């Protein structure tokens, strides 16, 4: 799946921030974030080496720093995209009601996920804008 709707030149960490905050379970993020970032770093470096670009390999510290610099983006993705990912299959959104009346339905799964995600965002300093 390639999403060409948001094609832009940016840090490769942007994709990691997007994926983890839209799709990874809160428990995985809470318990395994460092391992996920390390695996991402290792895979990125291996890929760059295989493509003949060893000189472009970032350090793990660079990846970690960039990941946390993009925190507000992670919060926005977590709040908005996760609501669609965790939507209730039996509830069809009323876009007219959303736009005109501000009626927004959030699934129980989304509310449960956000009860874990928001404290994580606070712990990581991502809510200190």
Image: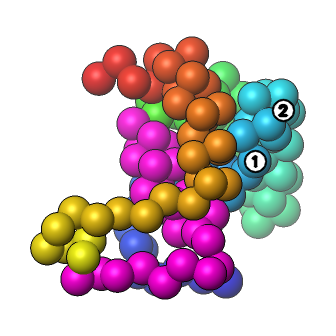
Q: Is residue 20 above or below residue 105?
A: above
Q: Is residue 102 magenta?
A: no
Q: Nearer the viewer, residue 128 or 39?
A: 128
* 26 lies above or below 92: above
Q: Residue drawn at (38%, 68%), measured in percent from left and top? A: 8
Above or below, 60 against 52 in this view is above
In front here: 77 or 40?
77
Q: Residue tagged by mark 1?
A: 25
The location of residue 22, given as percent across then percent down, is: 59, 56
The answer for how far apart the CA atoms under marks 1 and 2 are is 10 Å
Which corner quadrant of the image does residue 35 belong to?
A: top right
Secondary structure character of the magenta stretch overall: helix
Give the camera-side residue of 49 and 33: 33
Residue 83: give x, y in percent of width and height.
52, 60
Task: Report the residue marked by disc 2.
Answer: 32
Q: Is residue 65 visible?
A: no
72 horizontally vs 54: left or right: left
Q: Which residues are magenta?
A: 72-96
How dense is the environment of label 2, judged by Cα within 10 Å: few (below 14), some, or many (20 and up)?
A: few
Quadrant where the C terminus sits is top left
Q: Give whichever of 110, 1 is nearer the camera.
A: 110
Q: Is residue 84 magenta?
A: yes
Q: Quadrant of the N terminus?
A: bottom right
Residue 76 seen from this side: yes
Q: Nearer the viewer, mark 1 or mark 2?
A: 1
Label 1 or label 2, whichever comes before in sequence order: 1
Q: Position of residue 128 (x, y in %)?
A: 35, 18
């Amino acid at each position: 799946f390639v999403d060409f709707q948001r094609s832009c030149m940016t840090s490769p960490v942007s994709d990691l921030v997007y994926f983890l905050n839209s799709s990874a379970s809160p428990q995985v993020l809470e318990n395994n974030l460092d391992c996920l970032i390390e695996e991402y770093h290792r895979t990125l470096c291996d890929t760059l080496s295989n493509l003949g670009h060893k000189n472009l390999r970032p350090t793990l510290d660079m990846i970690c720093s960039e990941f946390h610099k993009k925190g507000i983006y992670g919060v926005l993705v977590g709040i908005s995209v996760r609501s669609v990912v965790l939507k209730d299959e039996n509830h069809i959104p009323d876009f007219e009601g959303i736009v005109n009346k501000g009626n927004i339905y959030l699934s129980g799964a989304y509310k449960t996920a956000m009860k874990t995600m928001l404290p994580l965002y606070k712990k990581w300093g991502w809510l200190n804008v």
